[in-house]
Image (tube, coloured by chain):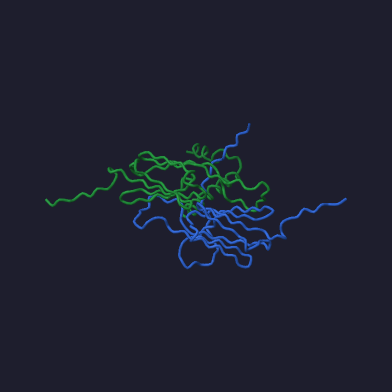
Amino acid sequence: MLLRRLYEWPARNMTSAFEELESMKRQMDLLTQGLTRGLLREPTSGVFPLVNVTEDKNNYYIRAELPGLKADDIDISVTVDTLSISGEKRLPVEEENARYHRSEREGGKFSRIISLPSPVNTGKVEAGSADGILTVVLPKAEEAKPKQISVKVS
Amino acid sequence: MANIESKALQAKEKEEVTSHAEQTKSGVVFTPAVDIFETDKEITLLADMPGVTSKALNIDLHENTLTLDGDVNSPERDDELEVMREYRTGKYYRQFTLSQVIDQSKIDAVLKDGVLRLRLPKVEAATPRKITVKS
């Protein structure tokens, strides 16, 4: 038992007491971050664009904010259980001698695949873009729609 | 020949306005990302405000303070159930202080695909003149 204790301490090859303290501090920071940031933030995949998925009885609705992108700039393809959104957000080239005060907007390529909760009818998927918001309507496949089952009185 | 590829676009959460006069309508308020640049003739402001239509956008200029206020309607209908929500919907609000050099009568605003392009022409006297140095 004495031998086992010697092996476990100091923790993980740390040579000085300060290293151990530093490591503990880092772990505490991670823990508190996880508690506060995790609660306040919505979980995301971290891939552009961020999407909201909603559903009703017949369809799935997937929306994404893509300011500055016209319908032609966005490539959408769908399989039975995934939706793929890709394209490039181009920032228009401004005059050569423009001097910038602020540059907060970003441009670049993006490509994202979203898994769908249940199969969709790929032939009837519609997508539209208005005011920089892309909306994709995916009708659920017949098998995936909820069916009412009547309970018979025996 | 160098082939510059566009870098991949990173997903960023929208900036929420922290200090702001209380709204009459409840809801979250975001700060739109803007690019501001100037040339000799004018200052241009580009703001990303997806979901804002021209009718819902208020641009106010009052004593050199420029206010952008864009209202956004929640696109989801009432009977839609949430499956996954990665971003919130809310109005956009941002204020800027303009310098005196703007000719306020000639300001031009275009809202297209959720991007506002605001052109603020400079007053004639403020366009830089080159001064030749005589020897």
The hue used for chain B is: blue
Q: Position of residue B87 (x, y in %)?
A: 46, 52
Q: Quadrant of the N terminus of chain B?
A: top right
Q: Position of residue B13 (x, y in %)?
A: 51, 51
The answer to whether residue A119 is left or right of residue A153 is right
Task: Return the residue nearer the eye: B114 or A46.
Answer: B114
Q: Identify the residue at horizontal 58%, vertical 40% (top origin).
A: A14
Q: Identify the residue at horizontal 57%, vertical 54% (top origin).
A: B117
Q: Which chain is green?
A: A
Q: Identify the residue at horizontal 63%, vertical 68% (top origin).
A: B63
Q: Is residue B56 above or below residue A143?
A: below
Q: Identify the residue at horizontal 51%, vertical 67% (top origin).
A: B22
Specify the farthest residue to the right: B135
Specify the farthest residue to the left: A154
Task: Return the residue nearer the eye: A130 or A28.
Answer: A130
Q: Write down the quadrant of residue B59 in the picture.
A: bottom right
Q: Position of residue B38 (x, y in %)?
A: 66, 53
Q: Count the marks.
A: 0
Q: Is residue A132 above or below residue A11?
A: below
The answer to whether residue A100 is left or right of residue A35 is right
Q: Position of residue A46 (x, y in %)?
A: 49, 45
